[in-house]
């Protein structure tokens, strides 16, 4: 075998083809892996645009084996390892090509197409520089060929759409020069180790050995080995007194985190967690011959380990104000605030700041994140902002004012800190329930409740509170009749409901979700009036609950919000020529898979406006990507839709049909292909898990939930449907499966298949049955992140088996979402549903057996 360092541009130049063998798994990178790569690319782009000479970023290795040479002399290579990286980079270049085309830079687009993507003078399969495995081939070639089905469902289509989105967003801020810098980085600044096998090597054996290696040394392991190699006389005592206690206190993952944070707080704001050892070694090399200096560095790291534990476990912090600030950020989740928090604890412990100043500084950091959540700004770039902060803060400054000034500096991009007016408008109009992660939404409502200053504070650890909609998500006729009194400009009650239901003014916390359900407001009043929460008592004191009341409460909550979370320095409010909602609309259109459509109302509810301005905006912005996918509420193309000059001819329906959207004889798009507001939010990477998600429950709680589910089922469905549902669930339990119930007011039920029999073992569920709304959701969105259904062909097989049942029509374009079918199907086809459930359980059991065999071959 031969190894050499190369770049992507050098790897693909010339007439050649990289073919992924059949024994390789399908393309599996998802948003998390794509975002990680993109963060690295952006960093290199920034360095280049700032005039610095960026060092190449090591992407990984690609192992190749020579295949046959074609009659015309073209060399084929089998991709033994590294197909995920190669496919991802190819999809990034396809998206880059298409961005050039949308801007009219046809020459740049053709250069990428001819030199990177295809062998120009070859035909058939030989035409493509990369030929993925069979399961991915059609999706990949559709992207290369700019087919109407490009960017469809599955991981290949999702990656292509991801790169379209991030390129469009970056181009808005950086222009053509930014896009050109991206191409330079992708082509020549991503370092790849190319390993080529010799003729006659056993390729499959190489693949097995690469993917079945032992445990690798972590970055902190490498650093430890280097440090103690440089401590020949003092190493044993230093290890015993400093390193080992620190290692045992933190554990492997947090030790890795510490040595990365140590770099960041020391001023290396561009430190990567994948390159900790390299950067720490470079920093410490001047001290390598000075054992006393190295011991001092390890002692300093040990002190920071104790401070990191106070960040991870805030109850360790002795100062009450600082402890409270750390607790709030801990409940918020994530590691964004860690560099700043560690820097502030350094200063407080060293006497350079008071604990009160450190607490105020963290409060400004919390406000920055909460206000951005309210107003819908992306979290992309926030990590970089907080990594830059420590090196920008002078040790003589008040840290709280320094943090506030730093976060107030930028008026555009990642460092926008919304002012009071922006927060008030967002609280009134934006769908807060679809923003951020579920724990973040909960923490905002908790803090708002605490602001009422109740004499008997709520014990949130025991209360089992969840987020509840007062105006229900699935409203009965009484609710729609109430809303009909307040509609305007031809608006229907359903449209008004969509605009109001997820806004902050309609949300509260409650432990009585099951009791509240979608009952009329009078019944909810009786329940909320007995709540210990002041916000619920305030809601119960209203005479009715409609648009006026929701907006009035939103105003009160907005006033509380701007007091609880103080804003930027006066005069530094973000100046933007365009409302952020339109940027969100463009991102949503770019994220839509080929073969789907949505409505003006769905988009309006996503971004916090009305359907009419959405229609006006789309009509005024010629050439907006995917605008033809936005239809009227009944699935028809708007009469005013026009293609931009020089683009396609014909109507929107023709294009949608080419993508795979069926239409009926009346010209209406099939509803199974429609994306709801929740679907659009999921495609944008938002956490949209509902409170009804299956979760562990005690026996008594489980029995109570089972009773609620059956009661709701009998109250809302026909006897035949009830018998079919209960029969399918009994069959599942007889096969050894479990049932889990959601915690929302509409108590869903999901059949669980467990991996192994140990308590708390991992479980998968294929679907969720909703007894009131009468739908059965197939949870592809969650299965795609969980083995073995992270393998796309298995999800497709599940969809195919379900679609073979009469009455079920799941759109292929929703393979990454949560499509549904009517629960009535179980009235006549319960046996067929049971057969699919049996296949699902068998697939899970087979995957578990294979996993155990890999861990211990003797188990077979």
Image (cartoon, rainbow, N blue to C red):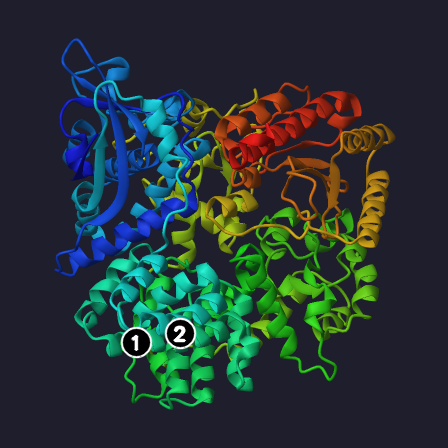
Which of disc 1 and disc 2 is earlier in sequence?
2
Quadrant in which the C terminus appears: top right
Question: Residue 484: image x %, image y %?
Answer: 69, 52
Q: Tell me what residue is drawn at x 76 percent, y 52 percent.
A: 518
Q: Residues within 10 Å of mark 1 (few under 14, many from 20)?
A: some
For image coordinates 59% across by 67% down, the residue present is: 443
Could you say whether the residue bearing mark 1 is in a helix, strand or loop?
A: helix
Identify the residue under disc 2: 242
The answer to whether residue 636 shows anywhere in this view is no
Q: Is residue 352 left or right of residue 376?
A: left
Query: Looking at the rendering, which quadrant does residue 188 occupy?
Result: top left
Q: Is residue 82 above or below residue 258?
A: above
The secondary element bearing badge 2 is classed as: helix
Write down the residue under mark 1.
Answer: 295
> Is the residue under label 1 in contact with that under label 2 (CB below 8 Å)?
yes
Label 2 Cα crowd, 10 Å radius (few <14 / some 14-19 / many 20+)? some
């Amino acid at each position: 075998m031969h190894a050499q360092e190369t770049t992507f541009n050098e790897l693909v130049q010339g007439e050649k083809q990289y073919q992924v063998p059949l024994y390789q798994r399908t393309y599996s990178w998802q948003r998390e892996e794509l975002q990680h790569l993109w963060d690295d690319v952006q960093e290199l782009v920034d360095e280049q645009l700032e005039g610095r000479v960026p060092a190449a970023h090591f992407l990984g290795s690609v192992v190749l084996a020579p295949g046959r040479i074609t009659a015309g002399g073209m060399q084929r290579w089998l991709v033994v390892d590294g197909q995920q990286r190669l496919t991802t980079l190819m999809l990034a270049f396809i998206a880059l090509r298409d961005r050039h085309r949308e801007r009219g830079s046809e020459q740049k687009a053709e250069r990428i197409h001819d030199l990177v993507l295809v062998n120009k003078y070859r035909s058939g399969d030989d035409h493509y520089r990369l030929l993925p495995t069979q399961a991915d081939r059609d999706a990949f070639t559709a992207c290369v060929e700019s087919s109407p089905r490009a960017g469809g469902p599955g991981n290949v289509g999702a990656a292509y759409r991801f790169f379209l989105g991030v390129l469009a967003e970056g181009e808005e801020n950086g222009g053509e020069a930014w896009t050109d810098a991206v191409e330079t980085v992708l082509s020549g600044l991503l370092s790849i180790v190319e390993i080529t096998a010799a003729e006659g090597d056993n390729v499959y054996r190489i693949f097995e050995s690469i993917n079945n290696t032992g445990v690798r040394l972590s970055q902190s392991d490498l650093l430890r080995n280097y440090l103690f190699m440089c401590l020949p006389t003092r190493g044993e005592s230093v290890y015993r007194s400093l390193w080992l206690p620190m290692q045992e206190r933190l554990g492997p993952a947090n030790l890795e985190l510490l040595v990365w944070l140590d770099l960041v707080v020391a001023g290396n704001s561009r430190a990567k967690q994948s390159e900790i050892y390299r950067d720490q070694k470079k920093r410490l090399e001047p001290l390598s011959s000075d054992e006393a200096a190295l011991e001092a560095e390890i002692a300093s790291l040990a002190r920071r380990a104790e401070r990191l534990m106070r960040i991870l476990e805030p109850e360790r912090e002795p100062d009450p104000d600082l402890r409270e600030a750390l607790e709030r950020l801990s409940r918020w989740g994530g590691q964004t605030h860690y560099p700043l928090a560690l820097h502030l604890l350094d200063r407080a412990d060293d006497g350079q700041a008071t604990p009160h100043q450190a607490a105020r500084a963290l409060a400004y950091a919390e406000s920055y994140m909460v206000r951005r959540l309210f107003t819908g700004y992306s979290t992309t770039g926030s990590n970089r902002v907080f990594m830059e902060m420590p090196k920008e803060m002078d040790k003589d400054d008040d840290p709280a004012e320094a943090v506030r000034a730093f976060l107030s500096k930028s008026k555009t991009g990642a460092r926008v800190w919304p002012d009071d007016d922006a927060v008030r408008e967002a609280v009134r109009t934006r769908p807060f329930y679809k923003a951020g992660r579920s724990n973040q939404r909960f923490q905002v409502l908790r803090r708002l409740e605490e602001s009422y200053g109740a004499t008997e504070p709520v014990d949130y650890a025991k209360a089992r509170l969840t987020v509840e909609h007062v105006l229900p998500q699935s409203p009965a006729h009484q609710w729609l009749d109430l809303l009909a009194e307040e509609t305007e400009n031809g608006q229907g009650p359903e449209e008004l409901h969509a605009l109001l239901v997820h806004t902050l003014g309609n949300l509260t916390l409650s432990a009585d979700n099951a009791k509240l359900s979608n009952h009329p407001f009078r019944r909810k009043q009786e329940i909320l009036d007995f709540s210990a929460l002041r916000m619920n008592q305030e809601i119960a004191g209203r005479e009715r609950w409609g648009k006026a009341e929701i907006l009035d409460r939103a105003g009160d909550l907005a006033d509380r919000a701007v007091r609880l979370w103080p804003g930027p320095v006066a005069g530094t409010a973000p100046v933007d020529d365009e409302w952020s909602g339109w940027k969100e609309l463009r991102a949503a259109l770019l994220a839509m898979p080929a073969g789907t459509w949505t409505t003006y109302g769905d988009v309006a509810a996503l971004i916090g406006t009305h359907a009419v301005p959405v229609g006006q905006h789309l009509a005024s912005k010629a050439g907006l990507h995917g605008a033809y996918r936005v239809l009227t509420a009944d699935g028809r193309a708007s009469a005013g839709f026009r293609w931009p000059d020089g683009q396609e001819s014909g109507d929107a329906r023709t294009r949608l049909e080419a993508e795979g959207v069926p239409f009926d004889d009346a010209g209406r798009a099939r509803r199974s292909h429609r994306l709801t507001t929740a679907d659009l939010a999921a495609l944008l990477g938002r956490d949209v898990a509902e409170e009804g998600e299956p979760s562990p429950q005690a026996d008594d709680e489980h029995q109570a939930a089972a009773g609620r589910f059956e009661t709701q089922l009998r109250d809302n469905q026909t006897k035949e449907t009830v018998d079919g549902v209960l029969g399918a669930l009994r069959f599942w339990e007889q096969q050894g499966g479990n049932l889990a119930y959601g915690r929302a007011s509409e108590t869903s039920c999901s059949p669980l298949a467990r991996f192994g029999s140990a308590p708390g073992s991992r479980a998968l569920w294929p679907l969720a049955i909703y007894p009131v709304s009468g739908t059965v959701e197939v949870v592809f969105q969650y299965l795609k992140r969980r083995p073995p259904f992270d393998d796309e062909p298995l999800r497709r097989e599940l969809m195919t088996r379900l679609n073979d049942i009469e009455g079920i029509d799941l759109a292929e374009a929703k393979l990454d979402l949560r499509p549904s079918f009517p629960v009535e199907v179980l009235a006549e086809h319960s046996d067929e549903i049971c057969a699919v459930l049996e296949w699902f359980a068998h697939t899970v059991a087979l995957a578990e057996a294979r996993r155990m065999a890999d861990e211990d071959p003797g188990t077979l």
